[in-house]
Image (cartoon, grey):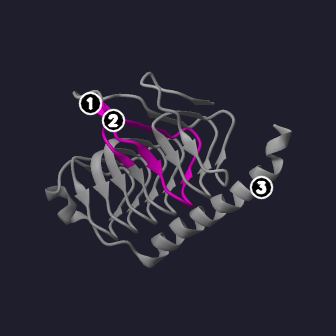
Amino acid sequence: MIRKNPTGHLPTIHEGAFVDPTAIICGKVVVEDNVFIGPYTVIRADEVNDQGDMEPIIIAAGSNIQDGVVVHSKAGGLVIIGRNTSIAHRAIVHGPCVVGDNVFIGFNSVLFNCTIGHHSVVRHNSVVEHCNVPPGFYIPSTCNIHSDAELSQIEKVRPDVAEFSEDVARANVELIRGYKRLQNEF
């Protein structure tokens, strides 16, 4: 479902993207080309700051937002999901938040008020908030990172982990093509 927010902003969705009919996209959201938005995803840009304005939520080209993901922002803060990035099933990205290009965010992970550098991996069931993850970092499953100081214990992304993330992104681009062919059957 594509809908306006209370301030009248309507999502902008590139014709080359696929949005599952069960997803809800609301407000000042930009979805670029070759984006896959899976079933029961909610992307909602509807809160304003103290001046009554808001930044957009941007899903950059080639990214995939999988089943049950929630993307939202507190007080109209900016949210950017970079190019060729995978946000896995039931993850939450709550802005303000910037996720770089070629990033993998694992199942049930939570991002809040943080920056995730390009080519980083946040594995399943992790929480990352109030910090700036440099490019190429690997955060293992079930980690809780609440400050930049805690990042000193994190290892760089291993090549096998980066390859897995790239495979997920490629698989979801293929899903876009398949679902776009079927779109008129829904």
Residue at 54% of width from left, 45% of height from top? 89
Residue at 49% of width from left, 60% of height from top? 85
All told, the count of numbered labels is 3
Marks 1 & 2, CB-CB < 8 Å contact: yes
Q: Amino acid at mark 3?
A: Gly
**Quick one: quadrant of the C terminus?**
top right
Residue 175 x, y percent position in the rendering: 71, 56
Residue at 27% of width from left, 50% of height from top? 114
Along the horizontal axis of the image, is 164 left or right of 159?
right
What kind of element bears circle 2?
A: loop
Q: Please name the residue that numbered disc 1 is placed on.
A: 49
Q: Residues within 10 Å of mark 3 (few under 14, many from 20)?
A: few
Q: Amino acid at mark 1?
A: Asn
Q: Please name the residue that numbered disc 3 is placed on.
A: 178
Q: Measure how far apart labels 1 and 3 are at the Cα level.
A: 39 Å
Q: Is residue 105 above or below residue 4?
A: below
Q: Residues within 10 Å of mark 2 (few under 14, many from 20)?
A: many
Q: Please name the residue that numbered disc 2 is placed on.
A: 54
- Give the magenta-colored segment's residue range: 53-79
Q: Is residue 113 above or below residue 160?
A: above
